[in-house]
């Protein structure tokens, strides 16, 4: 099932790519149902916090009728940054499935691991590498094209 939902997250990343946004997508699944999706919109919205995960979490909270997203999994094409990892913890998401890691800004194991820090009152299970090549490839293509411009 992880690959199925990660493919949906990749579809979200492609939407970002088509808008000229950094192609990162996110999907929130609760009890086997997709309750929210999101993709990066920082340039479009001119907002530093318009990351795929934040957009998906906000939508999921609305659909769930509250801020606690227990019994949920978030699928993200690229490892969440510290802000997004913090939002995942704050919303009590149980599981995070990551496509490719982000060695420059990742906060789920690359630079730090906020999701497994026992000092916090919540931890999330982290699964890494689901459709890693596809998730990494869209980012590489995006930045290669951007550099050519």
Image: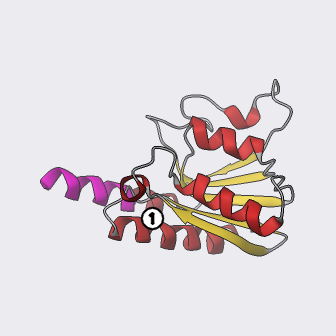
For residue 35, say whether it is visible: yes
Residue lying at 48% horizontally and 42% vertically, measured from the top left: 102
With respect to residue 146, does 60 lie above or below?
below
Query: Which quadrant, please, contains the C terminus?
Result: bottom left
The secondary structure that most of the magenta stretch takes on is: helix
Query: Which quadrant, please, contains the N terminus?
Result: bottom right
For residue 129, say whether it is visible: no
- Where is residue 105? Give x, y as percent: 48, 35
With respect to residue 67, does 10 lie above or below?
below
Q: Residue furthest left?
A: 149
- Where is residue 70? Give x, y as percent: 86, 55
Foreground of the two, 56 or 78: 56
Task: For mark 1, give the secondary structure.
Answer: helix
- Where is residue 148? Give x, y as percent: 13, 54
Residue under numbered circle 1 = 134
Magenta part of the protein: which range?
A: 137-149
Q: Is residue 145 left or right of residue 70?
A: left
Foreground of the two, 112 or 41: 41
Q: Residue furthest front?
A: 46
Quarter of image, res 18: bottom left
- Where is residue 13? Give x, y as percent: 46, 65
Residue lying at 53% horizontally and 38% vertically, measured from the top left: 106
Foreground of the two, 110 or 93: 93
Does the stretch in magenta take in 139? Answer: yes
Q: Is residue 138 left or right of residue 97?
A: left
Question: Few, some or many C-alpha atoms within 10 Å of disc 1 (few <14, some 14-19, many ≥20)?
Answer: some
């Amino acid at each position: 099932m992880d690959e199925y939902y990660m493919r949906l997250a990749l579809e979200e990343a492609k939407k970002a790519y088509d808008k000229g946004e950094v192609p990162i997508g996110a999907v929130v699944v609760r009890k086997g149902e997709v309750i929210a999706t999101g993709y990066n919109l920082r340039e479009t919205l001119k907002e530093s916090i318009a990351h795929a995960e934040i957009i998906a979490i906000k939508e999921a909270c609305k659909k769930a009728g509250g801020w606690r997203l227990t019994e949920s999994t978030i699928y993200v094409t690229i490892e969440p940054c510290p802000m997004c990892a913090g939002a995942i913890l704050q919303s009590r998401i149980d599981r995070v499935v990551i496509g490719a890691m982000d060695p420059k800004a990742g906060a789920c194991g690359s630079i730090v691991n906020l999701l497994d820090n026992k000092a916090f009152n919540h931890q999330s299970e982290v699964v890494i590498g689901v459709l890693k090549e596809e998730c990494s490839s869209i980012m590489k293509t995006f930045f290669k094209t951007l550099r050519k411009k």
